[in-house]
Amino acid sequence: MKKTLFALAATTAMLVAGAASAQDKAKACFIYVGPIGDFGWSYQHHQGALEMQEALGGPDKVEIAYLESVPEGADAERAIERFARSGCGIVFTTSFGYMDATNKVAAKFPDVKFEHATGFKREHPNVATYNSKFHEGRYVQGVIAAKMSEKGVAGYIASFPIPEVVMGINAFVLGAQSVNPDFKVKVVWANTWFDPGKEADAAKVLIDQGVDIITQHTDSTAPMQVASERGIKAFGQASDMIKFGPETQLTSIIDDWGPYYIERVKAVMDGTWEQHDIWHGMKEGHVVMAPYTNMPDDVKAAAAETEAKIKSGEFNPFTGPIMKQDGSEWLKDGEVAADGVLLGLNFYVAGVDDQLPQ
Amino acid sequence: MGMAEAILLTIATAATPLLLAAIGELVVERSGVLNLGVEGMMLMGAVVAFGVALATGSAWIGVVAGALAGMAFSLLFGVLALTLVTNQVATGLALTLLGIGLSGMIGVAFVGQPGVKLEAISIPGLTELPLVGRLLFGQDPMFYISILLTAGVMWFLFRTRAGLTLRSVGDSHSSAHALGIKVIAIRYMAVMFGGACAGLAGAQLSLVYTTQWIENMTAGRGWIALALVVFASWRPWRVLAGAYLFGAITIAQLHIQATNLADLAGLPGPLYWLAGAVKSVPSQFLSALPYLATVVVLVLISRNRRLTMMNTPASLGRPFVPDR
């Protein structure tokens, strides 16, 4: 009897110890919309996650769990809930389409923190949102495109008509127009974030239609490779894609999520996590431009100058006067667009020759 | 290169992987086996073809390795579904899931590596011909392989004794068995042929379509191939038509999107108005159009119910256990 009691006590002690050490160890979970091997959007999020784990003391201190290629919609809710149940202290849902699912699950698990990337709904105190000002990079790309293009027309492979993508197209066009007011953009909606074949098809179609610069807001390296094969220039997306077009890539907008993930997971560990909505850009180092390559020095200089101005806060890409596509006035001279307006942006600026799918 | 030529070449590249995978699956289903693992087999073919081509520097060795990988992977399905008589639907789905995961694991080292391209052929004097030169004599080898395979399957299924035997196994395995035909052996061969074709389709994706390995790069093409077989009512030439229709509409809708109204300003009034109407169709609908149109067209050409019934392998998906 005594022996049994002792064994029981020992087991209990062990269990308690186990639980305590489990609590010391934070668990951060990530939901990705594509495979981590996409070399684009999801790849960069995962790099950020790994950077965070490394910075916060390695696998002994922070456990990472992730699910790849989670479809946006009903499946996402199940995946997020699974994570919330499995002891994740914080769950990062890294695509716009997880917005409602994230908030729904957050209501059921008030003790788990949720961070939704690129969205705007924070219906519960345990939901924060974060995003980066990629459009700052796209404005710089527009400046480069207008200087580099001989035909004055660029091809834009877009994914879904959500504010972030619309914002990117607008910023690109505004940047290009700042150099060449007649610059044209051909927009193709792939209606997917990730389908290398379809993205390649879109690039081929755009080149066949006469564009000599390609930029993309989809996640694979396929368009860069097509541009490379056809001998035109292109911009990378989300990560540095120079390997796929050593003589093709002009620059690339690199999403650097590492610093943010370090900050937020650390906050959970310290118990200082609070809901917020942040939208950082070049200034904070969340948006980084890959080296300017395959362009003459004067273009390089113009790009670097634009980048520096945005970085220092001296210039905002969405500064008036800016007209809407239909010709009505959006921003008066000198007026800067409010973040709230941009995050819900659902119209084109003047000069975009495309009908925005609603 | 003219615009029309460029468009046709792009369509052929988009249609080829669908045709390759579908023509293989057609033979499998004609033998009475339903293998839903096409997507998984394609991915295995894609990753192995890419890796081998990278290691050896030869795209051709990659193509062969891709076909063999697809075949080897389909053997797994064969052992489970044919020898151990597991449920074919569940086994096929498991094969797809395994293929997605396994190919991703094998391919970790290949991510971010530019691959080896399977170059288009070039015949001096012929490839340079205007209009048809590039289309007939200047495409990548996988295009010719897909067309030859389709023709070969048509000839085999409907013009040879072996093809008749295979179809009889698919229509009534019990009768075939009673006649002394080795049902399981024939089905194994069909499944392996399907696996090899899916492997070739994968190789086309990672060596021609986009010369790189990206996880899950098939993006659902295996499922489209499966659907093509059914909607083509198990007829090879209809599979060919379906694959090219799908490819054509995919590319056409991208062209519609890429054409700005300002490009068409010179058109006469009614045509310009028509173009405007087409341009006002939401892009989401245009993106769905290939699926919609392919189903509608194939259903229309297969609307003769008696013929469709005749073409449907009667034993499709039914397990066969020989009497002892």
Image (spheres, grey):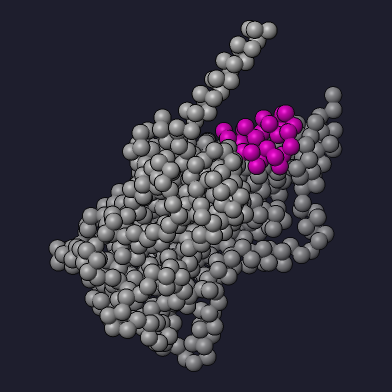
Residue A36, compared with residue A188, is above or below; it is above
Residue B261 lies, in percent from the top left, at: 44, 82
Q: Is residue B100 left or right of residue A316?
A: right
- Residue A12 shows in this picture: yes
Q: Is residue B288 above or below residue B81?
A: below
Q: Residue at x 82, y 41 (%)?
A: B172
Q: Quarter of the image containing the N terminus of chain A?
A: top right
Residue lying at 78% horizontally and 57% vertically, measured from the top left: B308
Say which of A203 and A110 sits in front: A110
Residue A297 x %, y %: 14, 63
Residue A212: within the magenta?
Answer: no
* Residue furthest front as drawn: A2
Q: Is residue B273 above or below residue B60?
A: below
| Residue furthest left in the image | A297
A33 left or right, relative to A332: right
Q: Residue at x 51, y 84 (%)?
A: B276
Q: Main secondary structure of the magenta part?
A: helix
Residue drawn 38% across and 78% down? A349
Residues A45 and A299: in front is A45
Q: Which residues are magenta?
A: B72-95
Quarter-of-image position of residue A338: bottom left
- On the question of residue B45 being in view, the answer is no
How many labels were placed on the picture?
0
**Quadrant of the image occupied by residue A37:** top left
Q: Position of residue A315 (x, y in %)?
A: 24, 70
Task: Pinpoint residue A147: horizontal percent, then vertical percent.
Answer: 23, 71
